[in-house]
Amino acid sequence: MTVRTATVVGAGIGGLATALALLRRGWQVEVLERFHDLTEVGAGLSLWPNALRALDALGLADRVHAQALSESRTGVRTSGGQWLARMDGAAHGGAVMIHRAALQSTLAQALPAGVLRTGVRVSRADADGTVVHSEGSCTADLVVGADGLHSVVRQTVWPDAPGPRYAGYTTCRMVTHPVAVDGGGESWGRGERFGYASLPDGRVYCFATVTAPEDGPRVGLEELRERFGGWHTPIPALLDATDAGAVLQHGIHELPPLRSYTAGRVALVGDAAHAMTPNLGQGACQALEDAVVLADRADASDGLHEYDLLRRPRTQYVARRSRLVGRVAQWSSRGAVALRDGLVRAAPADAFQKSLKPLVDWSPPACEGRRPE
């Protein structure tokens, strides 16, 4: 029996998960990562039930749960602390919070020795499965573009595809020293937001989102204290527990919808295919879904086409919803903010949780009873 080969470009969450999923299907896989060290630092992420089911399909659910913390009380508040909407963390099967670096490390450690090649910079990919990189070139039955927002694979295989666009706001992410907090969530002001969630080691992951021009000045800890120091408890204490060097600022970009995620022997996953704003906490979750579905379909005669048909509508739907939430949450005029807060507060108590159902009720193909071909 001929062993099929795959080259995965990028060792982020989507790339590592795809490599592991393909290996579990009997593929011979190599992962090419341009950095010498894996660099996911300084941030946390939520893993919703759809992502946890994908990790279960990869055989990693128990390992991830051991490093994660279940989210309890969460929801949306005003800058003064009044609740606009609440959600039970156990709804839809529960979500967990984990440091991004811990998830990436867990995925990397699950790969056999020699699969991950660091310090290899890819310069182009072709639809015939050829990848040109800093150490030569290779050809595989499948090339997976998992190289993020500025994907070289996407740019060279789809040279006419639209590039990233700025969402209109910038986000500062930080991890505090250990602080005791009760629950977590997000608070909305006028053109500003602040969110936080506890990590398993007692530290707290925080983010602050500010409407700003793309080329605007950097936002540091002192400006965050000026903007958010008068907001409700425990936001001031979280800022006091943060080192200035721990603040990582990133302008928020998204990828306009692509017409296809596949061409020839090439498939895109994660941000390379559908980089989305972080407003629904689904970026990493959708990348994990991509990995499981691509591996499930890759052996089929028309598998990449089926992968595209399965993943593109769903991920672009999630991206649209996330974009809309971000726009509304960043409203800044007094009238618009009063209208927004009033409508959210007046919504039925279970509206928030019901709105999440289409996002988190996904299950891997194997869980739906499909057998590999």
Image (tube, grey):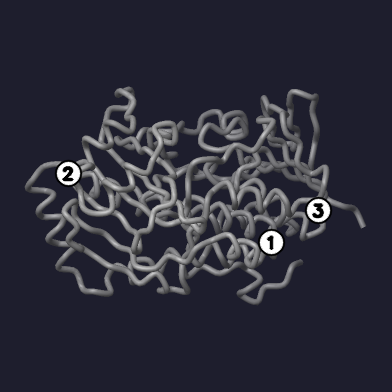
Q: Which label is found at residue 269?
A: none
Query: Which dot, 3 or 2, sits closer to the camera?
Result: 2
- The image shows residue 19, relative to residue 158, as above or below, that is below
- Give the alpha-carbon distance from disc 3 to disc 1, as whole Å: 12 Å
Q: Is residue 276 left or right of residue 23?
A: left
Query: Does residue 250 show up?
Result: no
Query: Does residue 8 show up?
Result: yes
Pointers 3 and 2 in contact (CB under 8 A)? Answer: no
Q: Residues within 10 Å of mark 2 (few under 14, many from 20)?
A: some
- The image shows residue 199, relative to residue 371, as above or below, that is above
At which x and y percent is residue 344?
19, 62
Q: Residues within 10 Å of mark 1 (few under 14, many from 20)?
A: many
Q: Which residue is mark 1?
A: 296
Q: Secondary structure at mark 3?
A: loop
- 12 and 153: which is toward the camera: 12
Q: Which label is found at residue 27?
A: 3
Q: Which residue is mark 2?
A: 190
At which x and y percent is residue 351?
27, 71
Residue occupying image coordinates x 71% and y 43%:
265
The amino acid on which the numbered mark 2 sits, given as a three-letter code, is Arg
In which quadrant of the rendered view does residue 363 lie? Answer: bottom right
Q: Secondary structure at mark 2?
A: loop
Residue occupying image coordinates x 21% and y 41%:
191
